[in-house]
Amino acid sequence: MQKLVYILFLSLLFSWTHEASGQNETRAKQRDLFGGQPKAKVVIVPYEGKMLLSDINRELGNEHNMTLPEIKNIFREGLCQMVAMEGSKEYDTFDMINSGEKAVYQDIQFIFNNLGYKYIETPKPKEEEEDENVIDRIEEKVEEKQDPKQKDRGVYVAKGEIRSDYDNRERFMDAHLLKPSLFEYLQEQYAADYFLFITQLDIKVMRTPEMPEWTTAERRLKMHYTIFDGDGKKVAGSASYAYFGPEVKDIFQIIKTYFPLLAADAIKAIPAEEEDEKKTSEEPVSEKPQDSPPSTRAEDDDDDF
C-alpha cells in the first residue's frame, strides 16, 4: 500500500510540474498580448543525491515502508517542486529534476561534473550586521591574540586528517564553478536569468546532551543554496530553515507543510530584476566545457546523481 502511495505522490509531483509550467507559458502569452514586461526566468537545479544529510531516514522508512533510495528521491523531487511552485509566483520557473525530459537529466549530471562545493559562513541579515558592529570591534581585539593558522577554519583537513575548530558560526554549502564556461552552455540551452542551485538538504534532530534520554527533540530542516545570474556570476548564497515536531512522521506532510517555508526564503534571495535588455541570440554558440553528459539518466539509487 505504501509503495502505491509513493508512486501516486511522484505522479502528483510530475503533474504539478507540468501544470506550473503551463501556467508560466500562459502568463507569458498574456504579457505579450497586453504589452507587459516578461518575468525573469529561474532554473531550479537539484542537489546531488549524496547531499542529503538526514537523521530521520530510518524513522520515515519504518513509517512508510520505503527504502532509502525512495526516501531520498521523494525528498529531492519534493523540495525542488516546492521551490519551483513558490518561485512561480514571481518568476517563470523551470524545475529540472521534475521536467520528465531525458536531455535535462543528462544536463543535471553534466552540471554536477562541473561544480565544486565549500562550506562558508552564512551571511547575516543587514539588520543583524548593524546591531553587531560594536561587538565586532571588540572581537577584533580578541582575534589579534588568536593563532592566525586557526582563524576561520571551522572543519578542515590537515596532514590527511579531518580536524575542527568550532566557533559556533553557522555555515552553508556554497557552490562554485570548476569551469566558468558552464554557463555559456546553460544559457544556450535554457536562456535563464537566474540559476538557483540547491546544494544540500539537512534534516537534523536537535537533541542536546542535557536532554533526558526519554525525551524527543524537534527537527530542523536546512536547505543550502547558491544563486547565479545568467552569466555565471554568483549573486546570492545562504541557507533557509524550518522546524517541525517529533510527532510529524509523514514524509508527505513534511514536504507539503515545511518545504514551502524553505522555498520562500530562497526565492526572496533572488535579486530584484534589472531593466537591462536580455542578451540577443547573436552571441556565438559555445561548446560544452567537458565531455558530453551521459546518454542515459543515472539510476535513481545512485548517490552521485
Image (spheres, rainbow, N blue to C red):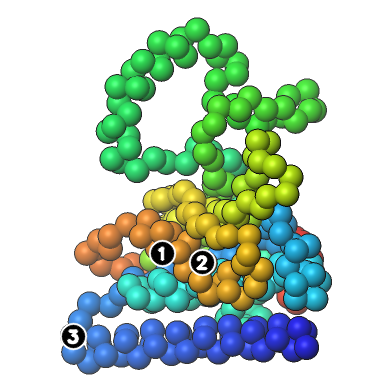
Disc 3 target residue: 35
Q: Report the quarter where the N terminus lies.
A: bottom right
Callout 3 touching callout 2 (CB < 8 Å)? no
Whole-number angstrom distance, CA of label 3 to CA of label 2: 37 Å
* Residue 99 falls left or right of residue 161: left
Badge 3: residue crowd in 10 Å (few <14, some 14–19, many ≥20): few
User: Residue 132: image x %, image y %?
Assistant: 33, 29
Point out the frontmost of discs 1 and 3: 1
Q: Residue at x 68, y 50 (%)?
A: 215
User: Residue 264: image x %, image y %?
Assistant: 41, 64
108 vs 115: above or below: below
Q: Earlier in the sequence, mark 3 or mark 2?
A: 3
Whole-number angstrom distance, CA of label 2 to CA of label 1: 10 Å
123 vs 144: above or below: below
On the question of residue 296 being in view, the answer is yes
User: Residue 147: image x %, image y %?
Assistant: 57, 11
* Residue 81 falls left or right of residue 91: right
Q: Residue at x 79, y 70 (%)?
A: 62
Q: Amino acid at mark 2?
A: Tyr
197 or 140: which is nearer to us? Answer: 140
Callout 1 touching callout 3 (CB < 8 Å)? no
Q: Amino acid at mark 1?
A: Ala
Q: Secondary structure at mark 1?
A: helix
Q: Report the quarter where the C terminus lies.
A: bottom right
Q: Earlier in the sequence, mark 1 or mark 3?
A: 3
Disc 1 target residue: 264
120 or 221: which is nearer to us? Answer: 221
Q: Secondary structure at mark 2?
A: helix
Badge 2: residue crowd in 10 Å (few <14, some 14–19, many ≥20): some
Q: Amino acid at mark 3?
A: Gly
The numbered dot on residue 258 is: 2
